[in-house]
Amino acid sequence: MIAKFDSWLLKKIYQALGKPPYLISLWGDIQIGPSHAKAIAHVHIKQRRTLLRICINPELYFGEAYSKGDLTLTGDLVKLLEHTYRGIASSKRNWLQKLIVTWQARPCNNSITGSKKHIHQHYDLGNDFYRLWLDDKMLYTCAYYPTPESELSHAQTEKMHHVARKLQLKPGDNVVEAGCGWGSLALHMAKHYGVTVKAYNISHQQILHAREQAKLQGLDDKVEFIEDDYRNIKGQHDVFVSVGMLEHVGVNNFRELGDVIARCLKPDGRGLIHSIGRNQPVRMNAWIERHIFPGAYPPTIREAMEIFEPNNFSVIDVENIRLHYALTLLHWLEKYEQNTDQVEAMFDEQFVRAWRLYLAGSIASFSVGALQLFQIVFSPGRSNNISWTREHIYSSLEKTDEASWKNVM
């Protein structure tokens, strides 16, 4: 009788997922899916408790079960997750499931204290960990690939040039960066475009690395790395830029961020925000929120307008490069898999599985369109210091180097 119930429940799950092309099996001999020859992957659930929890909230308990080893995944993990996400998106949940999923995905508070705690949990895992799978410049944001065949390091350099060109940086500009990561963009802008930068970040480990790099590159007189919250930005600047921070701000704080930008940006200044986003407002996956990225929320364009509208900022340009992020993540995952022995030595096997799932799941999310990557260029509403065309973004400036920027500006 119990076996019949298990089989019935498995069938319901498989149908709710849209009959994906992978096998799902339970303890014993119960399984469902295409033949082994046609299956792209295999999910094996080891116990009834795990099955029931996944039925209640797959977005939370699937990730927990995989991380803990209560289920195993073999085959093409990214393709498996792509089919899973499409199936979940198209399935109809009853009111109780919707209530549970919404309640368990409640975002954490991004106050100054809360933000510090959240950033510490993710970004202060240790520079040695991130060095294993990021590029040589330690960029942990979406790269920009001139062609799909480009290498990761080249694409990350192109991303920094792409951002700088959109901002139309010129020698002597004073730039403020909110959320500077390990400092590569700030150093790049100073080195290649002749600007000075004040870069804010609340990750202690990242700030230490950034300051060290500034000294090594002889740019510590051009770039100041400040260990502080973006809400405490001071002074007036020609340019505001933020790459990969907005996801950690929280919608409730968008107006405050807009006020900060309005306070620190000169009347004829320019700004750019680069952020993960969505087409529709959806809370962050509960497993990601709980175990990987506490306090994270990718906003829609409409939600992001809470930054711009109250302060009369004009949105000049919006670009969506989500497929570039899928490719960036694919390169990260490939490098991560090459170094899992070292990751396990730093942490444990559960951590290895959790971050594998996080990276693979992120690839799938961008591939199926569940996540977007927006770059928004803006300026004060009264400013006419804006480009006439978009030619400057796609000019030959990607070949700009330290010796030649004076000739091209």
Image: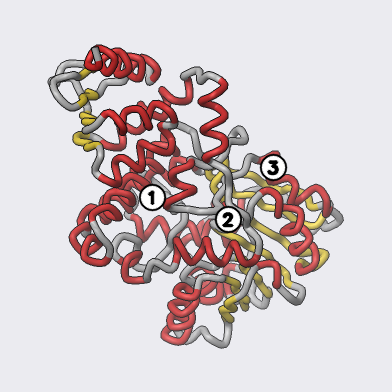
Q: Residue at x 46, y 80 (%)?
A: 208
The picture places residue 296, in percent across and down from the top left corner, at: 55, 51
Nearest the camera: 92 or 406?
92
Mark 3 or mark 2: name the one nearer the start of the chain. Answer: 2
Label 3 crowd bin: few (<14), some (14–19), many (20+), radius 10 Å: some
Classify mark 3: helix, strand or loop: helix
Task: Answer with the quarter of the image where residue 23 lies.
Answer: top left
Q: Is residue 135 left or right of residue 383?
A: left
Q: Residue at x 18, y 27 (%)?
A: 27
Marks 1 and 3 close (CB-CB < 8 Å): no
Q: Which mark is residue 303?
A: 3
Label 2 crowd bin: few (<14), some (14–19), many (20+), radius 10 Å: many
Nearest the camera: 12 or 192?
12
Q: Quadrant of the N terminus?
A: top left
Q: Nearer the viewer, mark 1 or mark 2?
A: 2
Q: Is residue 200 above or below residue 255?
A: below
Q: Amino acid at mark 2?
A: His
Q: Which mark is residue 248?
A: 2
Q: Residue at x 52, y 33 (%)?
A: 101
Residue 52 visible in the displayed image: yes
The picture places residue 276, in percent across and down from the top left corner, at: 54, 47
Q: CA distance from mark 3 to mark 2?
A: 14 Å
